[in-house]
Image: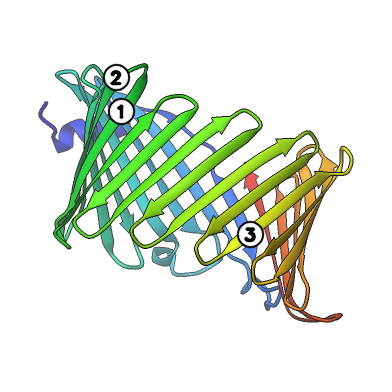
Amino acid sequence: MKFSLFALAAVVASAEAISKPSLSISVCDGNFDGVDGLDPTLNWSGSSSAGDMDLEYGVEASALPTTDLASLPRKVFGTLKTNVGGWGLTAGATRTMASGETDITVDAANDDADLSVSLVATADGGVDSISASKGLDLDGGSLTITPSYNLASEEADVVVAYDGGDTKVSLTASVDSQEVVINHDMGDTSVQLTASKDAQEIVLDHSMGDTGVTLTASADAQEITISQQIDDDNKISPTINNSGDISVAWERSLGDDNSLTATIKPDDSIAVEWKDDNWTANIDAGLSGLDVSGVSISAKRDVTF
């Protein structure tokens, strides 16, 4: 498959689908003059095709009023997809305007062979890393082997993952470190064990109707959380660790997937998260006895038009 500027121009010219812009606005710390404390961001994307090539493209831009139009774009990205000889090829580039860096990714996948190859590079520095993934059927489960190599650090590692349904095992190994993660699901109870040469941790989750228990334990720290669903709208979740630190979270359902969650750590902090439709508001503050200090407020709303 020969790519040319003419072919790329033809793809862009035959645009088929352009999405509506998406606008998000954040308010940080609750202190701002005019629009200085706002961070409105406009995301826009589109797609087109020509022959066996598909193109996706878009831009992330600041929506603040300014006379310097060149400062509005933050990121510009594009992804080209095609198929060659049974391989699905994807090439993407993202240009970050502030740093002037262009990140490039190239992926090739062959579904029949359950094999894929991925390459990450920059326009100025060349190839950063390369990895491959091969899947195998094994005794009713699936085994995936993923070796990778970082050219900058000259580090290589391999990840071997087994999925047997209720049991999943992942082994990550390199010259300097090895780590194994085991997950086992037993219906109401699930266990996760993580072990490396430097640390070991076990996480146990158990559900008993309206009550849930989560235990996290390592050589240096142990923590337990007990969640109690009081009624259809209220849940209380106290947490205590081996240092004697206690926190309590109260979650109140407001209906239609809206909720209010307050987490209190005595003599430490209080945090409140309020989700209301497309709005999400967070309030964080320090807490000493009944004195509240260092209040930080943020709010965000996603708007599509």
Mark 1 → mark 2, Cα distance in angstroms: 6 Å
Asked whether the residues under the numbered discs 1 and 3 touch, taking CB atoms below 8 Å apart as contact, a structural biologist would say no
Mark 1 vs mark 3: which is more N-terminal? 1
Q: In the rendered image of this protein, does residue 158 appear above or below residue 238?
A: above
Q: Say few, some or many: other residues with alpha carbon within 10 Å of mark 1 (under 14 / 14 to 19 / 20 or more).
A: some
Asked whether the residues under the numbered discs 1 and 2 touch, taking CB atoms below 8 Å apart as contact, a structural biologist would say yes
Query: Which quadrant, please, contains the N terminus?
Result: top left
Residue 136 seen in the current view: yes
Residue wearing tag 2: 137
Q: Nearer the viewer, mark 1 or mark 3?
A: 3
Mark 3 vs mark 2: which is more N-terminal? 2
Badge 1 element? strand
Mark 1 vs mark 2: which is more N-terminal? 2
Q: Is residue 152 left or right of residue 97?
A: left
Q: In the rendered image of this protein, does residue 33 appear above or below residue 225?
A: below
**Image point (56%, 56%), residue name:** 217
Q: Amino acid at mark 2?
A: Asp
On the image, the x and y values in percent for residue 186 come to 58, 29
On the image, the x and y values in percent for residue 134 come to 23, 30
Q: Any mark on residue 223, and which?
A: 3
Q: Amino acid at mark 3?
A: Glu
Residue wearing tag 1: 143
Query: Which quadrant, please, contains the C terminus?
Result: top right
Q: Nearer the viewer, residue 112 or 220?
A: 220
Badge 3 element? strand
Q: Amino acid at mark 1?
A: Leu
